[in-house]
Amino acid sequence: MSRRYLIPLALAALAAVSAAPARAGGAEDVGSQIVIPLVAYTNMLTTRVFIHNHDATAVVVQLRYVGEASTNTPGMQICTPGGTSLTLPLGAVVELDLTDPVASGCKLSPPGEQGMFVILAQPAKNGLVVGRISARARIDVTNPSTPSRRQVQYVDGIPLGQLDTTENVHVASGLAWDPAGAVLPGTKLTTDCFAAAFWDGSGAGGMIGSLRLEDYYGGQLGHDVKFALKPFQIVRLADVFSLAGVPPGPFRDVHGEFSFTGFGDEVLAFCRTTLVSPQGRSFGLQVAQVAEPTEESRRREFFADSTPGARKFSIAPTATRELHGIFVRHPDIAVCFVNSTDDLVITAVAPDGTKFTNTSTKTPDFGLLGQSFQGPSDLWGLEITWATTAAKTATVDYQIFCFSGNGTSLADVLADP
């Protein structure tokens, strides 16, 4: 590692940072289910969470804190602000201190707390409000020996529908290690990594993960680090270079590859590099990403009346059904409608064949926790059929509207019976 690389890094990381105006995420970070990868309450770290309601009406959200396995309150707890849930007024940005048992409803025992925070919009009765929210955490880093020096780190919330699954390799880049201060005397540079699992959609009851460290050229450093994950659990791999048996550094531009067993459940991984020097302590966060995700593009609201090939959506009087497909990212709240000059029925069909129908032009809310289908993000069907009240005098065109929190793909025709 060159001295030319580390000196600018140290100066930039340890410079006093003035707090920017707190806000939640932008439009591209909006979803109905949001995870903030890291919140922390230690002797040096405090966190404030900001939740932004982007919907046109108030949204009720459920809050879940998942403590890292080695902390004071490990595992998942459902937080109950005010003894129930949290209501986000129209357009509001709500600020929370998770150590406040009244305002947040979370029961934490700082110092020594770190974990992830999950925000779940609850479905509205009219089926139109699916809870478009975003969130962000502000982590303040205060060094007891130099209280005038403070770093402010923002951790953006990620829509759960944007997370990738155990099917993919998740890569965190830019990891570094210099535990003995070989480049900058008096400093210490270490990296911890974290991995988290969410709902047990596959029914596997958990998974085995593996972290491999590779240098800039793809050569492995040390050996694979194995770990186990249960649903709704987050684990910390402290000082991963030491865990992997890597010879003393320094190292830079290392990437960590996370692989998982399992059957398509959503997972999250990230690494945190810590720089300690006589001037204080600084952190950098690297969220693991998938180079070639399997998900298609997503639209949180869409109107479709034809395929990309300009074939109009239509159903003949003699047809039994028309079948469309949309890619749904779980967990989510989705609802679809069909509109035509004659009476039609729309039914959502889960990948396992479970059907969600009101025998009307509107589906029930689907994709929710607690429903019969709890599988991973996958292709759903939308069946268009004739209602019993339909005149069926001629072929009719129709349109499909869908609303969701995480976004779905467009409703292309899958098959003509």
Image (cartoon, helix red, strand yellow):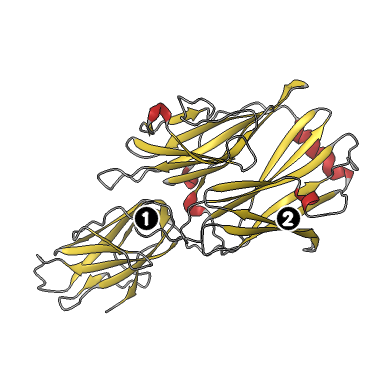
Looking at the image, residue 332 lies above or below residue 68: below
Say which mark, if any, is on residue 236. none
Q: Amino acid at mark 2?
A: His
State the SS at label 2. Answer: strand
**Numbered circles on residues, count:** 2
Where does the C terminus fall, quadrant-wise? Answer: bottom left
Q: Quadrant of residue 283?
A: top right
Distance from the alpha carbon under mark 2 to that under mark 1: 35 Å
Near mark 2 (Cα within 10 A), the count class, few <14, some 14-19 or many ≥20, is many
The residue that disc 2 covers is: 255
- Viewer-proximal residue, 63 or 343? 63
Residue type for callout 1: Gly
Tell me if residue 90 can be seen: yes
- Where residue 327 appears, x then y in whole percent? 41, 62
97 relative to 318 in the view: left or right: right
Is residue 154 visible in the rendered image? The answer is no
Q: Residue 256's image quarter?
A: bottom right
Residue 154 at what x, y percent from top left? Answer: 60, 36
Q: Quadrant of residue 139?
A: top right
Q: Position of residue 75 (x, y in %)?
A: 55, 42
* Label 1 residue SS: loop
User: Which residue is pictured at 63% across the width and 55% down the height?
Assistant: 228
Q: Horizontal and vertical percent for residue 62?
A: 41, 39
Circle 1 packing at 10 Å, graded few (<14), some (14-19), many (20+), is: many
- In the image, residue 48 sits, relative to residue 362, either above or below, namely above
At horizontal 36% and vertical 31% (from top left) the residue drawn is: 89
Q: Which residue is mark 1?
A: 367
- N-terminal of the pair, mark 2 or mark 1, is 2
Residue that appears at 45% across and 60% down: 377
Decide if residue 301 is on the left or right side of residue 181: left
Q: Nearer the viewer, mark 2 or mark 1?
A: 1
